[in-house]
Amino acid sequence: MKTVASALRRTGFAAMLACLSSLAMPPAVAQASEIRYIVNNEAITSYDIQRRAAFLRLQNKRGNLQQLAAEEMIDQVVRNAEAKRLNIRIGDDQVAGAYERFARSNRMSPAQMDQVLNQAGVTKAHFREFIRSQMGWAQVVARQNRSGGQMSEQDVVRRMLQQGGAKPKATEYMLQQVIFVVPSAERGAKLGARKREAEAMRQRFRGCDTTREFAKGLIDVTVRDLGRVLEPELPPDWEKQIKAASVGTATTVRETDRGVEFIGICSAREVSDDRVAQMVFGAEQGGDEDAEGASKKLTDELRAKAQIVRR
């Protein structure tokens, strides 16, 4: 999946932002909000649709913008629900970072970006939720491409014969997740201190056998054994860090919506069996598929299963 910034640049949104930042536009007038759609028990209001229509206008889209906006909001709701089902969470810090990077790439401060979006009728809040949804959906599609392309035994044998009969190899990890919980209401006050605690524990990490012993004297620390995970199954947001870490060490500490976390590498070994062959060949096959096509296909499937009521 392409990044939020690159996707918006293709639509001309970045150029529109640059133009709008130099114009004196009246602020958007607030209007009464009414529920227009119920999608799997989640409401989409006229206010949501107005904000998305303004966003489409900012991208220089043509056509019935109200209808296009409604369709985009329905897509966003079903995609968010799928991300939630897969336990994919995009934290506020990740969204804020993407928002700031996009502002900088358009030679604006975040405050200037806020002003432009508000003047255009999009609002900062709507755009940030769009970013959150796009980031979560990118992980959904990546995971689908990795796990969805499961091949039959016959397909695996055929691919193996094409490659001289050798089964592909993949690294199998034993992983342990350590979470320093920070309630959302206390995030501003406690996040820094919890990050220092997590970093101190990470530096002491020498293997998974002693993690729970280290955690005993700490408050609100959760240790999860993630078990055996093959390389193609690694969560996209942790993949690079896990691959870069050595056995007996841990990834760097990351802020998440739960608090701060790191993942310990208990062991890693190279394996080659039927499951690996099926997964690796399937991932290669899925990787050839156009990402936008895969996104549309999965979205269409989710919409077909969703309960969509127009009010």
Image (cartoon, rainbow, N blue to C red):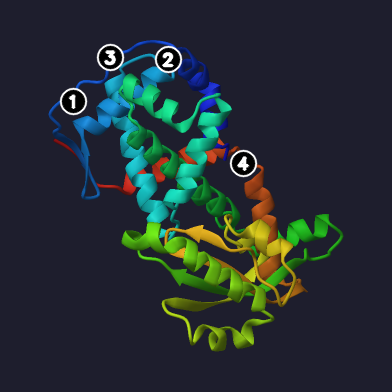
Of callouts 1 and 4, which one flags the residue occurring earlier in the amino acid sequence?
A: 1
Q: Residue 71: where, in percent of width, then height?
A: 32, 31
In contact (CB < 8 Å): disc 1 and disc 4 = no
Query: Where is residue 115, by image quadrant?
Result: top left
Q: CA distance from mark 3 to mark 4?
A: 45 Å
Callout 1: helix, strand or loop? loop
Callout 2: helix, strand or loop? helix
Of callouts 3 and 4, which one flags the residue occurring earlier in the amino acid sequence?
A: 3
Q: CA distance from mark 1 to mark 4?
A: 43 Å
Dot 3 amino acid type: Pro
Q: Nearer the viewer, residue 41 or 12?
A: 12
Q: Which residue is denoted by mark 4 in the rendering?
A: 289
Q: Callout 3: few (<14), some (14-19), or many (20+) C-alpha neighbours within 10 Å?
A: few
Dot 1 amino acid type: Ala
Tell me if residue 263 can be seen: yes
Dot 4 amino acid type: Glu
Dot 2 amino acid type: Leu
Q: CA distance from mark 3 to mark 2?
A: 12 Å
> Where is the C terminus found, in terms of image quarters?
top left
Q: Which residue is denoted by mark 2 in the rendering?
A: 20
Nearest to the eye among marks 3 and 1: give it: 3
Q: Which mark is residue 30?
A: 1
Residue 8 in the figure: left or right of residue 246: left
Q: Is residue 230 above or below residue 81?
A: below
Q: Which mark is residue 26?
A: 3
Of callouts 1 and 2, which one flags the residue occurring earlier in the amino acid sequence?
A: 2
Q: CA distance from mark 4 to mark 2?
A: 37 Å
